[in-house]
Image (cartoon, grey):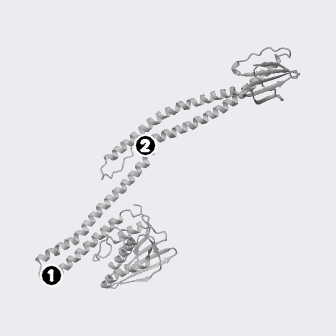
Amino acid sequence: MNSLRRAALVWMTLLLALIGAAAVLIAYRFAYDEASEFLDGQLRQIALNAGEGMSSSAAAPIDQDPEDEFSVTIWDAVGRKIHASPPNVEIPRQSQPGLADLSAAGDHWRVYMTSDGAKTVQVAQRNSVREEIARSAAIGAAAPVLIVIPLSWIVVGWAMNRLLGRLNALAQELAERSARATEPISLSGIPVEVVPLVEGMNSLIARLRSAFEQQKQFLSDAAHELRTPLAAIQIQADGLVSGSPDALEERKAAIAQGVQRASGLVNQLLRLARLDEPPSPQANEPVVVAPLLLACVADQVEIAERKGVDIGVIEQHPALFPGPAEEFRVLLENLIDNAVRYTPPGGKVDVSMRRIGEQAVIEIVDSGAGIPQGSEERIFDRFFRAARADAEGTGLGLAIARRIAERNGISLDVGNRTDGQRGVRAQVTLSQAAGRHDKT
């Protein structure tokens, strides 16, 4: 599990370490350059002083600080060494006057040589002197950073404790909330950086509240819809006991019709509940649409004939659907059943499938009463019936069809016909990319 405190400390330490490293490098380079410039001046000054105070016949010692580690050598006009300090250090004579770097006596030296014709003076100093000055400056630059790093741990840890203390209070509030609590979480006292997280929680709570309300309404509507066929069955069952023998067959048929209606409603409710579950991620074999469409129409032919409705397929073209065959079959069945159910005797239901570019378009067009004005936005609501009151149905067909379309990336449009005739046109559009796009 990730720790915000540990992450903050690690990043703070890395940042300070980088700053410290940069400060050390800059201080070392700057101090080395400054020391070199100053000590080069010292070399020149010592060489000039040694040349003025030294005759070719004398060899008096030159006073210097042993810590400066200077080596002074003087030659006369004929190249004879007349002075060397310290005498045990042998620095080769340079051929050209001025500054130079060389290696001698097992060390690296900075050398300055000057000559006035009568004498040649050469002063040398170990480079380690300059490096020591630069190291001292670098250590001085690193020391504050080394002190700041542990202090930053203390400060960041204290600040994180205060911040996490607020989050702990929020966590305690959430832990004490009821499972059915749908009030949004207060943003009071919440750090600005945590506000997006809390707002996301509030958005989730709002969706849960909406889902709870829909579920409650769904159960209420389901109970109401089941009450009617069950009450009819109860009435007919009572009549079996007290009624005349002549009405026995009629009552038995009414009971069977009521059971069939209640069974159909329960099946639709179960189907709708299954569609509310997340879809299976398993791949589906492409479905050849034409045979499936013909089979769905064939299932409605007998019902349509008994009702006096002319149903048929007027056009079809080959197409594939890459989603689950069973769900696609249910979608087509509900749309075709809906068209037959709300078309009056003598009416027509025409089913067609055509290709438009890369899309396959299925249309179910009926000659029924159409959708009443003002009901267009509600036709996909559960248990809503927009047609005649004498048309039997559960009011769930279009709700199921829309849910299947949403789960599989299908475009579904249902509305009144636009050719000037009465009736409803349901249009299903499939694209080559049609597949699962469920967000539940």
Q: Nearer the viewer, residue 219 or 153?
A: 153
Asked which quadrant contains residue 258, the reply is bottom left
Q: Residues within 10 Å of mark 1 (few under 14, many from 20)?
A: few
Q: Nearer the viewer, residue 347 or 352?
A: 352
* Residue depicted at 48% across the width and 42% down the height: 7
Q: Nearer the viewer, residue 375 or 269?
A: 269
Q: Judge whether 123 appears above or below 23 on screen.
A: above
Task: Assign a secondary structure to mark 2.
Answer: loop
Q: Judge whether 142 appears above or below 377 on screen.
A: above
Q: In the rendered picture of this protein, how many numbered marks are placed on residues?
A: 2
Residue 191: give its label: 2
Q: Is residue 418 visible?
A: no
Quadrant placement of the C terminus: bottom left
- At label 1, the amino acid type is Ala
Task: Name the residue carrying label 1.
Answer: 247
Horizontal side, residue 346 vs residue 435: left or right: left
Expressed as whole percent of the image width and height from the top left, the position of residue 213 reads 31, 59
